[in-house]
Image (spheres, rainbow, N blue to C red):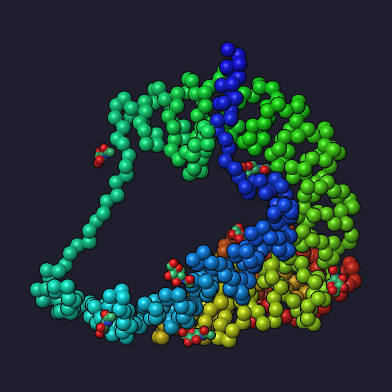
Amino acid sequence: MLLFWVLEFALAVFACEPTGDTDAASRNDCYRKDCDGTVYDIQEATCCENKLHPGASLSCCGNEPYNPETATCCKHNLTASVTQDLSEKVSKCCDLKAYNPVNEICCQSTIISKPGPMAECCGKDVFDKDKQLCCGPADNKTILVRNSRHHECCGHSQYDTETQCCCSNEEKLEIQSKDSSCCVKNFTPGVQKQITELQPNCTEPNTHLCGSSCYNPKESQCCERNQKPHWFCASGVSKTTPTVYNPRTQVCCNGCVSAWKPWIDQCCGETPYGSAQRGVLCCNKTLYEDRDDGEECSEMGIPYNPAKGTICCSQFHGSPGQHCCGTEIYRPHAEICCNGHRHLKSENIYCCGVKAYNIKDPQMKCCAGTLYNLTSLDEHGGDAQCCGSILQKPQDICCSSEDKEVLYSAKTGFRCCGHFYYNTTLWSCCAGRLRSIHEAGQDQRKMIKESRLLSVNNLNKANLCKVYIGAVESVSLQSVVFTNVLKVYGMEAKVKALPLPYVLETNDRCSYPKLIPGKTYFFNKDNIFTGFINDSFLQSLHFIISECSPRITTHRKSTNMPFAY
Ligand SMILES: *[C@@H]1O[C@H](CO)[C@@H](O)[C@H](O)[C@H]1NC(C)=O
Ligand SMILES: *[C@@H]1O[C@H](CO)[C@@H](O)[C@H](O)[C@H]1NC(C)=O
Ligand SMILES: *[C@@H]1O[C@H](CO)[C@@H](O)[C@H](O)[C@H]1NC(C)=O
Ligand SMILES: *[C@@H]1O[C@H](CO)[C@@H](O)[C@H](O)[C@H]1NC(C)=O
Ligand SMILES: *[C@@H]1O[C@H](CO)[C@@H](O)[C@H](O)[C@H]1NC(C)=O
Ligand SMILES: *[C@@H]1O[C@H](CO)[C@@H](O)[C@H](O)[C@H]1NC(C)=O
Ligand SMILES: *[C@@H]1O[C@H](CO)[C@@H](O)[C@H](O)[C@H]1NC(C)=O
């Protein structure tokens, strides 16, 4: 009898397997993965089809590694191909080639420059919807110059919708005047489609609906799950609908039904257990059994005994109470830990991704977690600017908005609008938004100025070291009101609070980036900047004071770069 119970209990416990979570698994392993037998850190290398390639933040395009910040992977007919010099963040694919959809269009596998902002495909050609029409059957289209805004297609011709109609006469399309008999009789109202759900109508006594079945709430309840659309219960069966269960003999844990036992009073993920059961530990929704007394859940959700050792990313170390850096223990008095990699501590040592560098070394530049040594580059090193994680070359342009920095190859007649790079014959830009250029009416001189949000990381010292910080309260055409304003004197490592809101005059609103009320910005009298993209405000402030305060007398080359160009 007892044996039978134990067996049944074991079945109940293991019937509901938790779904495998690869994300959590990689975090538990400190960003370490296996590439054909070699363990590597995904922050330092990429594994494409079992081959390891060094380099941070790369992706795979088939078996080829590429950087989505500067290239695009297009897949077509089981082939994959990389297009360089166009970031995947802003591109689209035309079969195997990438293009910039702001200025170009893909018509039947060919990339074509848009003739106008409202360009569309007409067969394998392109037409400007504002000025042209694409008429005819799908296999034989012709582009016509649109006579007026009221003109539409009728077969291969166009007609005036205000005075004419297009009626079908024995499979032939004809243009006739609106009062003709053909126009009057041909009017058919649109067919309305109704979508009826295939749900049963629950009737007495089974009055409640649970997934696709009805139940009596006096006898049963509905076992539902809140978030995931699919889950796995008893013997790995994928569930998408709730199940009816009897709360007197069964227990529902997160969408899975198991047999109820007197000691069961908790759920651990999908598994029921009792808080009085010995040797049982629930760590991050996974139930562990046969554990020693004194064991706890580690930060990574793995059981361990803190009196016996330290657990660092699922790696156990026999020395209790230590600090972890990745899978290793480290001594914070002597070392710094950069994303799970230890480095010896010294003055002005900062982390840049997994590496460490001297922030006062003018030859080193950290771009969003990627460290560059400027000496190994050409002489222009001194003016080096970051564009996201990429070090910009002089022939590159960086377009940035609130949440994206995108690198482009510079082209004449093109400008930045937020993180987009646009052809100025097609578009104009105001406050980070593209506007189509129509022939008449707009003052283009005013609209054409570009707006990009420059990050603090790219400022020269003159601008960086005397800067205001404030939250945008209100934006008008002429000015921006900032509240809670701090003035940072980076050289003296001093911060002063302004007693009143600061009003920044912006005589040309279009040339300023899009500002979000409530968000905090760095600014001076001429410009508004962001912090490091995705990094904390505190980190930006720390960077400013570290860069500007002259405690250590290594001089950073003055760069005199303008903030916008
Ligand atoms: C892709 O496959 C289709 C049919 O299999 C073929 O007609 C087409 O030519 C292929 N395209 C390319 C670019 O290989
Ligand atoms: C910019 O757009 C115009 C209008 O379509 C086009 O003629 C021109 O070639 C485009 N410029 C470039 C560099 O693509
Ligand atoms: C396409 O349409 C034109 C009329 O615009 C007609 O002359 C031609 O025969 C059509 N071609 C085909 C292949 O149907
Ligand atoms: C449920 O009832 C509604 C109206 O009360 C009806 O339109 C629908 O067809 C019924 N569904 C089924 C599956 O019987
Ligand atoms: C717990 O597991 C979930 C998913 O299984 C994961 O998202 C979460 O990060 C884990 N928590 C910890 C602390 O590892
Ligand atoms: C940068 O590169 C130069 C030349 O390759 C080298 O001498 C120097 O040590 C490097 N600096 C750092 C901090 O690695
Ligand atoms: C920044 O954060 C946003 C959302 O929080 C995310 O979508 C974006 O990918 C992040 N950018 C980078 C460069 O990490």
Where does the image place residue 533, in percent across and percent down from the top left? 66, 64
Residue that appears at 67% across and 31% down = 288
- In this rendering, is residue 499 above or below 117? above
Residue that appears at 45% across and 23% down = 246
Quarter of the figure with the C terminus: bottom right
Where does the image place residue 430, in percent across and percent down from the top left? 52, 76
Where does the image place residue 529, in percent across and percent down from the top left? 66, 70
Q: Which of 536 and 39 lies nearest the eye of the viewer?
A: 39
Quarter of the figure with the N terminus: top right
- In this rendering, is residue 544 above or below 13? below
Asked if one can make out residue 250 in the rendered structure from this viewpoint, the answer is yes
The answer to which quarter of the image holds residue 548 is: bottom right
**Quadrant location, ligand no. 1:** bottom left
- In this rendering, is residue 442 above or below 523? below
Horizontal side of 311 relative to 429 (left or right) equals: right
The answer to which quarter of the image holds residue 134 is: bottom left
Number of numbered discs present? Answer: 0
Horizontal side of 330 relative to 453 (left or right) equals: right
Residue that appears at 89% across and 67% down = 551
User: For the view shown, which residue lies furthest in the left direction?
Assistant: 181
